[in-house]
Image (tube, rainbow, N blue to C red):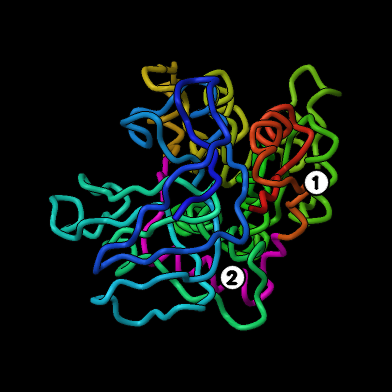
């Protein structure tokens, strides 16, 4: 059985090819992909590779998707041909040092899955058992495909400890920043966001429902504007960095109040270092947090939020392209001409 797929060969080199479908073993499930989404991580992988996600080349590519069960291994329980499903891009082992401490996102043996930019994808046993979910009746494939990216944000928001009435600032409003802002609103927070892209600023209003929107192109020091929107100008209760740049990480301490929380949600390039004001950390009692990835619990919570309509993810799809145009879709996303591009095989 053959399929069309986008394959990763090297940084900057992805190819649309016809390849063999990996037939599922007795414990696996073959899914026919109905919707896939572009992602910032896929763009980074496309540009510079990814030693964790892609260890061998050529490799399948892409990890946010939903689809229909095409084949089921004979030992698989709970799924049948025709089921509408969404899968996470990983599943923890449940046995390592971190899993025993319920820090499943830090699992030393995460089973990873790539290959969403294709007509079919084979779901490995551990993901079938822990992170393959049926899509609720009435929920579209394109909305369900957001379950994985939103799960990261659900995890981040839950771990941050946002309380009703808090003033939360989000610096960087790509899809992740927009979703973080939306979930902070659902927590009852007053939300201030900052960005520079007109499309993203528009969605900060229409999707995130932010209370204040700062166009950083208009200000030499936008971090000072954040403080002007806070009680007595003291600073944010929670400052969230969703860009992943060291110079932005360092600015976060200038917009949070004493006793507040700084959340470094945007991951910087490996090997990056930053300078932090130890006086502020200690004497101002700034809490610092950084949350990575998701867990089965947050993956399920994410799907529930989407199915309930609490997060209208469809608004984040600003372009649609066929599978063979995946390279163009990634480049459009990278340029900021789209928030999320829906790829349809």
**Rendered residue at 49%/56% (across/down):** 120
* Mark 1 nearby-residue class (10 Å; few <14, some 14–19, many ≥20): some
**Rendered residue at 24%/49% (across/down):** 107
- The boundaries of the magenta stretch are 290-313
**Rendered residue at 13%/50% (across/down):** 97
- Name which of mark 1 and mark 2 comes first in the sequence: 1
Q: Can residue 129 be found in the magenta stretch?
A: no
Q: Which mark is residue 305?
A: 2
Q: For the residue labelled by badge 2, is the local secondary structure a helix, a strand or a loop?
A: helix
Image coordinates of residue 168 in percent, x first then y, are 63, 48
Image coordinates of residue 108 in percent, x first then y, are 20, 44
**Rendered residue at 36%/53% (across/down):** 22
69 vs 199, left or right, is left
Image coordinates of residue 72 in percent, x first then y, are 36, 73
Q: Are marks 1 and 2 in contact (CB under 8 Å)?
A: no
Estimate the spatial distance between the alpha carbons at disc 1 and disc 2, rounded to whole Å: 24 Å
Residue 315 occupies quadrant: bottom right
The relative height of residue 270 versus residue 96 in the rendered view (above or below) is above
Q: Which mark is residue 212?
A: 1
188 vs 291, left or right, is right
């Amino acid at each position: 059985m053959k399929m069309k797929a986008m394959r990763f060969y090297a940084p900057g080199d992805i190819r649309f090819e016809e390849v063999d479908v990996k037939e599922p073993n007795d414990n696996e499930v073959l899914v026919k992909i109905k919707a896939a989404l572009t992602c910032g991580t896929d763009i980074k992988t496309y540009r510079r590779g990814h030693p964790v996600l892609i260890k061998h080349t050529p490799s399948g590519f892409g990890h946010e998707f939903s689809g229909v069960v095409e084949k089921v291994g004979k030992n698989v329980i709970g799924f049948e041909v025709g089921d509408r499903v969404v899968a996470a891009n990983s599943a923890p082992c449940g046995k390592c040092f971190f899993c025993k401490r319920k820090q499943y996102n830090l699992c030393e043996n995460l089973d990873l899955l790539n290959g969403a930019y294709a007509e079919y994808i084979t779901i490995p046993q551990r993901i079938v058992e822990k992170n393959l979910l049926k899509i609720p009746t009435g929920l579209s494939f394109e909305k369900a495909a957001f379950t994985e990216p939103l799960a990261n944000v659900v995890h981040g928001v839950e771990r941050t400890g946002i309380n009703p009435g808090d003033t939360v600032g989000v610096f960087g409003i790509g899809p992740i920043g927009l979703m973080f802002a939306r979930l902070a609103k659902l927590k009852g927070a007053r939300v201030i966001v900052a960005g520079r892209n007109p499309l993203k600023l528009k969605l900060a209003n229409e999707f995130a429902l932010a209370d204040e929107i700062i166009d950083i192109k208009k200000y030499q020091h936008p971090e000072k504007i954040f403080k002007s929107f806070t009680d007595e100008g003291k600073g944010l209760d929670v400052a969230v960095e969703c860009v992943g740049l060291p110079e932005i990480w360092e600015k976060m301490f200038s917009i949070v109040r004493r006793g507040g929380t700084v959340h470094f949600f945007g991951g910087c390039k490996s090997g990056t270092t930053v300078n932090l004001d130890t006086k502020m950390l200690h004497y101002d009692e700034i809490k610092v947090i950084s949350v990575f990835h998701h867990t089965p619990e947050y993956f399920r919570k994410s799907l529930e939020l989407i199915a309930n309509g609490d997060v209208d993810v469809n608004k984040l799809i600003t372009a649609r392209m066929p599978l063979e145009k995946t390279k163009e879709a990634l480049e459009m996303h990278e340029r900021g001409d789209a928030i999320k591009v829906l790829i349809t095989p």
